[in-house]
């Protein structure tokens, strides 16, 4: 098997922008990676975060994404925490496994995380970040990367953070262009990502709201980033990474038909289905993914309204078929708020979901 660090290096030195699947807790797990790679897939995959504290052990279900990596692509192992000896110990443990890089999460906006001064909470303490990065850089022989937001509630701190990131010889920096306070819904500040590109000696990956080949091209042009990290857009449209590649080659972008999207949802159901989980729980689990997919299916919010009320597999696929059993091409881009908001059929909550492809639980998830 190719050494993942060598593979990662080759991708970084290659001519094309690096396309990275974003980590999304409880969403981008091993079964999802397996399915995504059947649609072309990303160049690099980042694990859900390993929670690190004084007595933590590597979560086995996340570790399997590394040891059973089905993608053939390099894997980056992400950690979240602020206890330096524990982070160093965990980074060493992770390097016993086939990973390309160890990544530190500096963006998680869940109150339960940031109140403990981990994830996005650390962005309020640049001196602590300095100490953590110093210790980890020494402990990590593989690539060492950071995924950050641009500040906690004020992006002014970004000017203080960039020299700290630069000082510790990171191999890659991913910037989600929002503050922690901005969660997932505000506009993405691509100008801050461009500032990171200008200031950092290492490659920078741009993250936030890339949902089509056109927005991918625009974000790359605006930021000058070495690549893109994509989360929600890839759940909604698993063809997206390949579509971006087609667009860059100057080929016509192939849009899936409604029936192909339906087949994707069926494959997703089978992929995440486990024999020990009953049908109602399984249907419930699918709604997490459908919140993203639904935002690209139709503009009125009716699909999400109906799917959120089903409890059986038969009803779930009946609602999906009502909207997708056709051969028309599906752009799968999220519908614009103004269009969605015209529908009288939907509650404000469903409208929000349709606009952003988000679940209510995101506020606590990541
Ligand atoms: C449900 C959910 C879970 C997430 N989990 C993680 C995580 O474990 N680690 C992380 O660094 N970011 C996490 N994120 C943030 C994403 O990686 C990404 O930065 C964010 O969704 C913006 O990118 P997008 O617009 O392409 O989705 C999560 C986001 C969501 C919506």
Image (cartoon, helix red, strand yellow):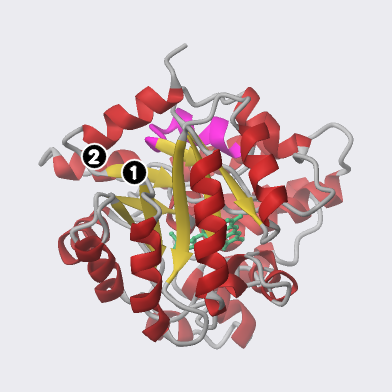
Which percent across, then down, holds residue 18? 30, 42
Residue, far left? 250
* Region in magenta: 32-43
Q: Mark 1 Cα within 10 Å, few/some/many (few <14, many 20+)?
A: many
Tell me what residue is drawn at x 41 percent, y 81 percent.
157
* Residue 200 shows up from this direction: yes
The magenta stretch spans residue 154: no
Residue pictured at 58% horizontal, 71% vertical: 122
Image quarter of the C terminus: bottom right
Q: Splitting the image into 4 quarters, where does residue 93 fall?
A: top right
Point 49% across, 72% down: residue: 356
Residue 256 appears anywhere in the view? no
* Helix, strand or loop at mark 1: strand
- Depth order, front residue of 229/355: 229
Which residue is tagged 1? 19
State if disc 1 and disc 2 touch (CB < 8 Å).
yes
* Residue in the foreground of this view, choosing between 174 and 259: 174
Q: Residue 280 location in percent, x, y?
A: 85, 51
């Amino acid at each position: 098997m190719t050494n993942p660090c060598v593979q990662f290096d080759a991708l970084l030195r290659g001519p094309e922008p690096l396309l990275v699947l974003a980590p999304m807790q409880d969403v981008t797990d091993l079964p999802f990676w397996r399915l995504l790679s059947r649609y072309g897939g990303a160049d690099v995959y980042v694990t859900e975060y390993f929670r690190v504290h004084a007595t933590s052990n590597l979560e086995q279900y996340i570790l399997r994404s590394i040891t059973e990596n089905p993608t053939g692509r390099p894997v980056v192992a992400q950690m979240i925490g602020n206890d330096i000896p524990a982070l160093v110990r965990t980074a060493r443990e992770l390097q016993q496994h086939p990973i390309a890089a160890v990544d530190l999460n500096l963006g998680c906006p869940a109150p339960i995380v940031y109140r403990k001064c981990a994830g996005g909470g650390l962005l309020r303490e640049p001196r602590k970040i300095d100490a953590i990065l110093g210790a980890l850089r020494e402990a990590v022989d593989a690539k060492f990367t950071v995924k950050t937001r641009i500040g906690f509630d004020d992006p002014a701190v970004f000017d203080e953070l960039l020299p700290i990131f630069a000082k510790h010889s990171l191999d890659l920096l991913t910037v989600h262009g929002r503050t922690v306070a901005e969660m997932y819904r505000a506009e993405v500040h691509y100008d801050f990502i461009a500032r990171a590109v200008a200031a950092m000696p290492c490659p920078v990956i741009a993250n936030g709201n890339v949902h089509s080949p056109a927005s991918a091209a625009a974000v790359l042009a605006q930021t000058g980033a070495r690549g893109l990290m994509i989360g929600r857009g890839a759940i909604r449209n698993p063809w997206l990474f390949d579509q971006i590649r087609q667009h860059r080659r100057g080929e016509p972008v192939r849009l899936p038909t409604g029936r192909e999207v339906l087949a994707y949802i069926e494959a997703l159901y089978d992929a995440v289905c486990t024999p020990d989980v009953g049908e109602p729980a399984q249907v419930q689990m699918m709604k997490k993914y459908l919140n993203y997919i639904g935002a690209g299916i139709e503009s009125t919010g009716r699909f999400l309204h109906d799917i959120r009320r089903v409890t059986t597999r038969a009803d779930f696929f009946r609602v999906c078929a009502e909207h997708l059993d056709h051969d028309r091409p599906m752009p799968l881009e999220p519908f614009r708020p103004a269009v969605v908001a015209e529908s009288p059929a939907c509650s404000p909550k469903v409208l929000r979901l349709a606009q952003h492809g988000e679940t209510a639980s995101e506020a606590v998830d990541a």
